Amino acid sequence: MTTPQTQQPQAPQQPQQSNTALVAVVATVLAAQLLPSFGLPALTPLLVPDRNPRGIAALRVALDTTEAYPDVPMQGTGAAQAEMVRVNTLRRAAYVVNSMMRLRTAIDAAMAQGESLAEAEQEVRNNEAVYFRQHVVAAGNRMAAASKIDSLAMQYGPTLGWYAANDKRTTPECRAADGSNFSALSPPAIGWPGVVHMNCRCQPGPPHRNAEMLL
């Protein structure tokens, strides 16, 4: 039998695309709770309509995991930070939805190997904590990028320049955005520099003279 001590967490697959309306409802429920786990009764009918014990266990683990790094209530001091507060709120709700689905699959697999529900729940709980820390780091990176944009907007105005780190690690999207300008008031379709993708190294800076505007 696989134990939490011997199993090595595998890198999570790409997040599944959650229903936008469902994520918005989950975000509203979570915002009304003192702790994410308090939302279990309200979220169970939405996310586990058949009330299957394995599904409820998966949802419980997803909610408990988010309590390790609770959201700090805050209001963005600038347009970019305010936008990232909104984005991070929705991303955390989407994390709960996707985490529950991932956990349900893992619990089913563990029980198929002969583990009890309690054993399977503890095993996936340990692994999910690793994945959630990655989610927290990404949220922090988004806020740090937004803070830079707000600070530079106070210095240069609402139009800023995009500066990519042009080397072999630069993604096509970031390379194409390099040298363009963007609005510090609302993100272009690609997103703001620093949050285009995980470990994005793009930076905001002074606006480029006569550069195209990213939309």
Image (cartoon, helix red, strand yellow):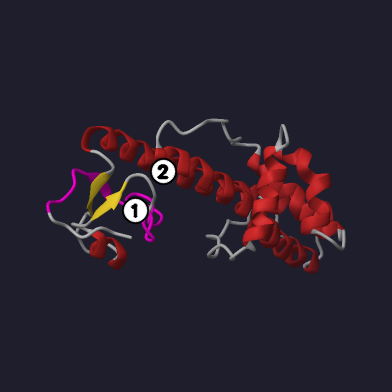
> In the image, what residue occupies the spot 37% across and 56% down?
196
Q: Is the residue marked by circle 2 packed among few (<14), some (14-19), or many (20+) residues within 10 Å?
A: some
Return the residue at label 2: 141
- 146 sits left or right of 50 in the view: left
> In the image, what residue occupies the spot 81% across and 47% down?
42
Question: Where is residue 79, by image quadrant?
Answer: top left
Magenta stretch containing residue 194, yes or no? yes
Q: Which residues are magenta?
A: 188-209
Name the quarter where the C terminus is drawn: bottom left
Disc 1 to disc 2, C-alpha distance? 9 Å
Q: Is the residue marked by circle 1 packed among few (<14), some (14-19), or many (20+) residues within 10 Å?
A: many
Position of residue 74 measured from the top left corner of the image (x, y, whole percent): 53, 30
Position of residue 193 measured from the top left corner of the image (x, y, whole percent): 32, 51
Return the residue at label 1: 200
Position of residue 137 measured from the top left corner of the image (x, y, whole percent): 47, 44
Mark toward the start of the polypeptide (1 vs 2): 2
User: Viewer-proximal residue, 5 or 97?
Assistant: 97
Mark 2 lies on a secondary structure that is helix
Does residue 64 show up? no
Name the quarter where the N terminus is drawn: bottom right
> In the image, what residue occupies the spot 74% across and 61% down?
104
Prevailing secondary structure of the magenta residues: loop
Q: Which kind of residue does numbered mark 1 sit on?
A: Cys
User: Viewer-proximal residue, 121 or 191?
Assistant: 191
In the rendered image of this protein, does residue 171 appear above or below residue 77? below
Magenta stretch containing residue 161, yes or no? no
In the rendered image of this protein, does residue 84 appear above or below residue 97? above
